[in-house]
Image: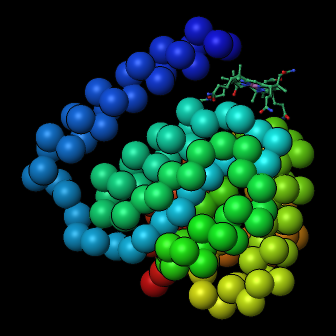
Amino acid sequence: MLISAEAVKKVEPLIKKSINDDKSGRSKYLGKIVIGTVKGDVHDIGKNLVATILGASGFEVINIGVDIPAIEFVNVIKKESPDIVALSALLSVGVVEMGKVINEIINNGLREKVKVIIGGPCVDDESSKKIGADDYGLSAVDAVKIAKKVLS
Ligand code: B12
């Protein structure tokens, strides 16, 4: 696992460069997204891939890293005023943490101001509805589709 994770990290800048070099297909500005992996979870390969693809699709992306507590998401929302917060988790317990982030957003009176999308192998329609997310996705391609959808 560690070797594959390191391999992907090495390749990531090359993927970004190749996307940035291909200016022909670049889209117009679509909005601002804050993305992070929720507390207790340090998996970031998929989340970084999602961030890269969203960035290449026209979104301004602020990637705040891994193991991010709910209150930290709220602090960044207050500072950056994003259109969307994207939550990533690979561990099953991540869904509970995602729910905590949404509750913290509600408690701080920010829910009307920001859309919340969630993703990772452990999320589905049921869990997304249960915690009150606006939508969920299972891949980087989904991320672009649902980000556009929740803002439309
Ligand atoms: C690499 C890896 C690690 C690396 C992570 C390195 C890193 N920098 O990310 C290391 C070695 C650190 C690691 C640690 C652990 N891991 Co791990 N890990 C994996 C592994 C092999 C691959 C994950 C991966 O990168 N996949 C490739 C990426 C591209 O896919 P992805 O992450 O799913 O992302 C895609 C989608 O999910 C989606 N997506 C992701 N985020 C978002 C967000 C949004 C908004 C949207 C729309 C979409 C989206 O789009 C992405 C791109 O297509 C998986 C097994 C597997 N086959 O998936 C286990 C796995 C996730 N790990 C697991 C476990 C248990 C652990 C540990 C607890 C092990 C341990 N006992 O220490 C620790 C947890 C540490 C922690 N606190 O987080 C379990 C989780 C089980 C569960 N369901 O809870 C898995 C499933 C392995 C298993 N079968 O048991 N792991």
The residue depicted at 47 percent of the width and 24 percent of the height is 9
> Number of marks in the image?
0
Q: Is residue 128 visible?
A: no
- Look at the picture and state if 125 lies above or below 112: above
- Look at the picture and state if 3 lies above or below 129: above
Residue 67 in the figure: left or right of residue 31 = right
- Which residue occupies the foreground of this view, 48 or 80? 80
Q: Position of residue 128 (x, y in %)?
A: 78, 65
Q: Is residue 134 visible?
A: yes
Name the colour scheme.
rainbow
The residue depicted at 53 percent of the width and 63 percent of the height is 34
Residue 17 in the figure: left or right of residue 133 = left
Residue furthest top as drawn = 3
Quadrant housing residue 112 = bottom right
- Look at the picture and state if 11 lies above or below 118: above
Residue furthest left as drawn = 24
Q: Position of residue 133 (x, y in %)?
A: 73, 71
Which image quadrant: the N terminus?
top right
Q: Position of residue 102 (x, y in %)?
A: 78, 72
**Image-quarter location of ligand 1:** top right
Residue 50 in the figure: left or right of residue 27 = right
The residue depicted at 39 percent of the width and 29 percent of the height is 12
- Which residue occupies the foreground of this view, 61 or 124? 61
Q: Position of residue 77 (x, y in %)?
A: 60, 73
The residue depicted at 40 percent of the width and 46 percent of the height is 52
